[in-house]
Structures are given as C-alpha cells and as structure tokens.
Image: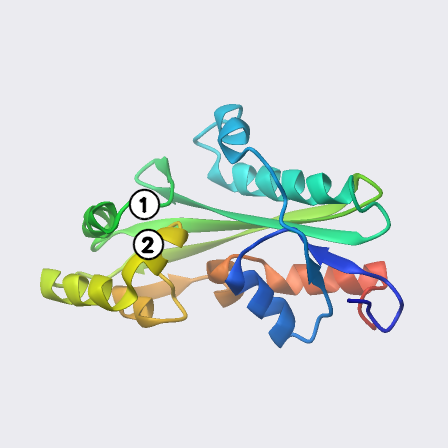
Amino acid sequence: MVSPSGERLVLASKSAARRAMLTNAGVPFSVDVADVDEAAVKAMHDPADAAGLAGELARAKALAVSRRDPEAWVLGADQTLAFDGGLVSKAPSLAAARARLLSMRGRPHHLHSGAALARNGQVVWSGVDTATLRVRDFSEAFLDAYLAAEGEALLACVGSYRLEGMGAQLFEAVEGDYFTVLGMPLWPVLAELRRAGVLRT
C-alpha cells in the first residue's frame, strides 16, 4: 500500500496489535514478516538489558526486510518483559502462563517496546519506550476464569495477557504509554514516519 506521498511502508511484524495500531491511526502499510532468529539475538545479548534487547530485535527485523525490499520504508518492532531481575519469554502452555501470572501477583514488571525504521538496508531511526505495570492481588478463581476465557491466544503474548481485553482486570496500576504496553511506541513512530515523508506533516 502506498501513502499519499508515494512512499511505501512495510511492517516487518506479524503482530495483530501492531497492525491494528497502524490501521487505526490511518497509516497505509503492507506486511512482510521478518525471518529473524530471535533466540540467536537473545543469546548474544546481556539478559539484564531487556530494553536494549527490544531495540536490537526491532532493528534486526527492520533490516531483514529492508535488505530484500530496499526501496520501501520498513518498520520493525519487538517487545520484551523484565520481571524479578530477569527476561520473561512467552509461556509455552496455559499451565505455564498460570504459574507466571501467580508469580507476578501483587508485583510490578516492565514492558519495553522497541521500534526501528530502515531503508536501503540501513537503520535510519530506532527507539525504545518502557511502561511499568503492577499486577493486583487477584484471586485464583479470577485467574482460572481469565485463562478459560482467553485461552491459547495468551501464548502469543509475552506477559500472558492482553491489556486491551479481559487482561486489564489483572492490574491495579500502569505507568507509561498505552501503545507501549500494546507492543509499539506509536507516537515516536508516527513522528518518524512524518519526517520520512510517509505521512503528511
């Protein structure tokens, strides 16, 4: 899809939340999912630097697609979750998601959302934003009802929740930008797209 200026934007992510953010903001784009070995990137990165990893993964995804479509503006994005001094990955099962949410009960964690814009095989901009979320002291009865209602869709979410759905009930406070929680620092991305000429100023 081409913008009014004639520039093309490609989203290098399969995330439905990121697609929805751009669509709802009126941004024309197409999707070309990046083929990046995330495990290899994580293995070479300091696990204590979750924010830096989010940015590194976003840049890797933008570059992977930009190299095969150099004339387009390519937007890469990724998100990491830091909790209890470590990096949290997506839960492999609902049982694991249940255990993780129980461990987070009554405690804060941090979501880092990174984004990067590339063209001609070069990153021209990248940024990371952080939100802090405090999980409330929910009952196990609520947790079981939540898991039953949301099902295996939660396994695609790094924190085993979707704030835009019933997952909002898991929290007592959120400090930071809503879009960052959803998986992309939208305001900085829109600003860069305007600078790049993809969007009107």
Counting from the top left corner in percent of width and height, residue 182 is at 48, 62
Any mark on residue 37, and which?
none
Residue matched to label 2: 160
Amino acid carrying label 2: it is: Ser
Image quarter of the C terminus: bottom right
Please tell me in which quadrant of the rendered image residue 18 appears: bottom right
Counting from the top left corner in percent of width and height, residue 195 is at 82, 61
Q: Nearer the viewer, residue 119 or 85?
A: 119
Q: Secondary structure at mark 2?
A: loop
Q: Nearer the viewer, residue 56 or 19?
A: 19
Residue matched to label 1: 91
170 in relation to 13, above or below? below
Left or right side of 149 for 87? right
Q: Secondary structure at mark 1?
A: loop
Mark 1 and mark 2 lie on one chain; the one further toward the N terminus is 1
- At horizontal 38% and vertical 41% (from top left) the residue drawn is 89
- CA gap, disc 1 to disc 2? 7 Å
Q: Nearer the viewer, residue 21 or 189?
A: 21
Image quarter of the N terminus: bottom right
